[in-house]
Image: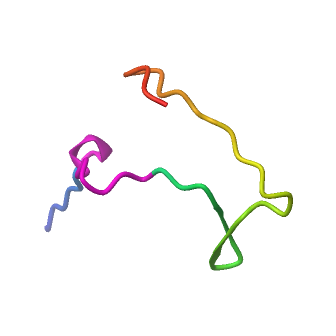
């Protein structure tokens, strides 16, 4: 029997953040039709 495991999300590199200003729709990153964005606060760190 083979056992596999995966790394938790917390092990992701801080040098390559997952923050995006676009949405992934139909296989492509796309900006909002109106172009508007808003700040999101990380509840764990308080960073925006």
Quarter holding the N terminus is: bottom left
Number of numbered tags placed on the structure image? 0
Write the residue at 63% across / 78% down. Answer: 28
Q: Horizontal placement of 44 versus 28: left or right?
A: left
Residue stretch in magenta: 8-18
Q: Main secondary structure of the magenta part?
A: loop
- Furthest toward the bottom, the residue is 27
Instruction: Residue 45: give x, y in percent of width and height.
Output: 37, 22
- Furthest toward the front, the residue is 35
How was this image coloured? Answer: rainbow
User: Would you place residue 12 above or below residue 1 in this image?
Assistant: above
Q: Horizontal placement of 26 versus 2: left or right?
A: right
- Furthest toward the right, the residue is 34
Write the residue at 42% across / 53% down. Answer: 18
Q: Horizontal placement of 14 versus 42: left or right?
A: left
Q: Is residue 14 magenta?
A: yes
Instruction: Residue 2: give x, y in percent of width and height.
Output: 14, 67
Of residues 8 and 39, the one nearer the viewer is: 39
Write the residue at 49% across / 31% down. Answer: 48
Q: Is residue 46 magenta?
A: no
Of residues 9 and 41, the one nearer the viewer is: 41
Which image quadrant for residue 40? top right
User: Would you place residue 29 above or below residue 47 in this image?
Assistant: below
Instruction: Residue 19: give x, y in percent of width and height.
Output: 48, 50
Q: Horizontal placement of 33 versus 45: left or right?
A: right
Instruction: Residue 22: give x, y in percent of width and height.
Output: 64, 61
User: Would you place residue 38 above or below residue 5 in this image?
Assistant: above
């Amino acid at each position: 029997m083979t056992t596999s495991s995966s790394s938790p999300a917390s092990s992701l590199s801080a040098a390559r953040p997952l923050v995006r200003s676009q949405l992934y729709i139909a296989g492509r990153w796309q900006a909002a039709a109106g172009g508007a964005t808003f700040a999101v606060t990380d509840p764990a760190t308080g960073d925006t």
